[in-house]
Amino acid sequence: MKLRLLLAFLFLSFNTLRAQNYVFDYNSRCHAAYQQYLSLNLEAGNALIRQEIMSNPYNLMATYLADYDDWLMLLMNGDNRDYEQRAGHFDERLNLLSKGDENSPWFRVCKAGIYFHWALVHIRFGENLKAATTFRRSFLLLKENNKRFPDFPQNKIFLGLEEAVVGTIPENYQWLASIFGMKGSVKKGVALLNSFINNSDNNTPLRNEAIIYNCYLRFYLMSQQEEVWRFVNSSQFPVQNNLFHSFIRANFALNYRKSDAALQVLKNAQSIDDYKNFPIMDYEMGTALLHKLDANSVVYFNKFLSSYKGKFFVKDAHQKLAYAYYVQQNYPKANYHREQALKEGSRTTDADKQAYRFAENNVYPSVPILQARLLSDGGYYKPALQKLQNVDIKSLNITDKLECYFRLGRIHDELNNDTKAVEYYKTTINLGRNRKEHFAARSALQMGMMYERLGKITEAVKCYTDCLSMKEHDFQSNIDQQAKAGVNRLTQK
């Protein structure tokens, strides 16, 4: 709040000054503030920005960097009250930035950065149209800046990211890209980011952010999970006293089915002072423990729900609690959390939508299949396979049957038993193509990734295309984006 008042004071005080009095000076104090923000040490970042504004009130770089406090807090915590209180900062900062020198290459990049940050925030709070228009403004500013200053390195950061994102917009959002006339390419976008990173060093403005964006694009859209995993575990991506890096490494670990690694980094992160300010860390810890079938997972999910003020992943957390209690045979508590998944949170994310459907249907997977799901999601493939070996698949209902075939496919895929994996994936696709469960679409996606890994490009593209042909299933947006990225990277030069 102190930072907001200071910015408002400056805006009113210098409203009549000419543009040439303002500068974009990314000095050592701005760099230090940026480093603090990108460590999720937001208060330390704010303190440095306050010092910069007081000593150099015409430095618009401080105005730009102040936006990281709002962006990261809203993105990580999703609190509607924070959103309402901070939303006004968006226009205030853009108005201040408009007083800068239009002949500076930073003039449009700083504005584009704020537009992009808030596009992500708007998505987080379910305001998709507002997110799309904000994203477009960022995209157009970057295009213009790239024409005016083609050699300005920071153009490549947001332009590369946005180019890749536009190239993989799911079909249900394609109308937005069509209306706004935006086209993109995953390969071109990642190439821009790589070019910036490879020609910069740790003192280059905004480099940390470019590295993080690049990791997520390569992991999710370029199918370079192993390369990204090695990088975030290297000395180039330190996690000591860096809560943001700790969260990112843990997040990749969970999505790369390495729950033991996630647990290790999250346990170490608990000693960082700001850990308690971000309940999402407890959600990640609960997820990692649940994948081990560890009963302590409920402690962390409950901590998350008691301290988290947002609406996202709330239904999903209740579903995970329901599963945790269900495998412990504590059916009253399992049913309580299933009911809470109907009442609390929102249905904005794919995970929350699926959790709501689970709660609405009031049907649990059979215990061995649920255990196999959790174990395989954590990377414990052999124990997961053991859970499925004694299951009589013919006796299962259709949902459990689909999941059983899919899990067998995934497990054999990870154990490099490719022939068996393809057999189970194809069985899942044939059985579940027209159903709302995501198992058939996910099987086509995973089979595409397998063929791509084996260098069978034609077969991979067919699988990705088949995945995209399946409609109205769980996790539609997430799966479609990955499948579209697969087609994009294998067919575009």
Image (tube, rainbow, N blue to C red):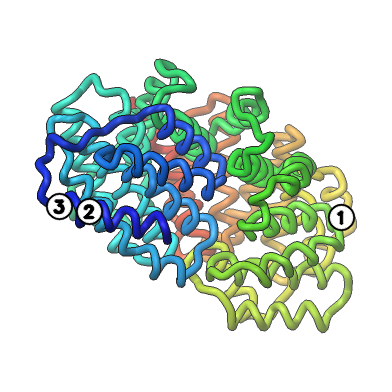
Q: Is residue 469 above or below residue 302?
A: above
The residue nearer to you, when weighing 50 against 395, is 50
Q: Nearer the viewer, mark 1 or mark 3?
A: 3
The residue indicated by pointer 1 is 387
Mark 1 or mark 3: name the one nearer the start of the chain. 3
State the residue at coordinates (50%, 63%): 78
The residue nearer to you, when weighing 332 against 447, is 332
Q: Is residue 342 above or below residue 127?
A: below
Rendering coords of residue 238 (x, y %): 64, 30
The residue indicated by pointer 2 is 11
Q: How crowded is mark 2: few (under 14 residues within 10 Å), some or many (20 or more)?
A: some
Q: Give the CA distance from mark 2 to mark 3.
A: 6 Å
The residue nearer to you, when weighing 134 against 56, is 56
State the residue at coordinates (37%, 61%): 122
Label 3 amino acid? Asn
Label 2 amino acid? Phe
Residue 411 shows in this picture = no
Residue 396 is tagged as none
The residue nearer to you, when weighing 222 against 455, is 222
Q: Residue furthest top?
A: 199
Residue 15 is tagged as 3
Q: In which quarter of the image is residue 246?
A: top right
Q: Give the CA distance from mark 1 to mark 3.
A: 68 Å
Q: Quadrant of residue 108?
A: top left
Rendering coords of residue 201 (x, y %): 46, 18
Residues under numbered marks 2 and 3 in contact, where contact means CB atoms less than 8 Å apart: yes
Residues under numbered marks 1 and 3 in contact, where contact means CB atoms less than 8 Å apart: no
Left or right, residue 275 beside residue 157: right
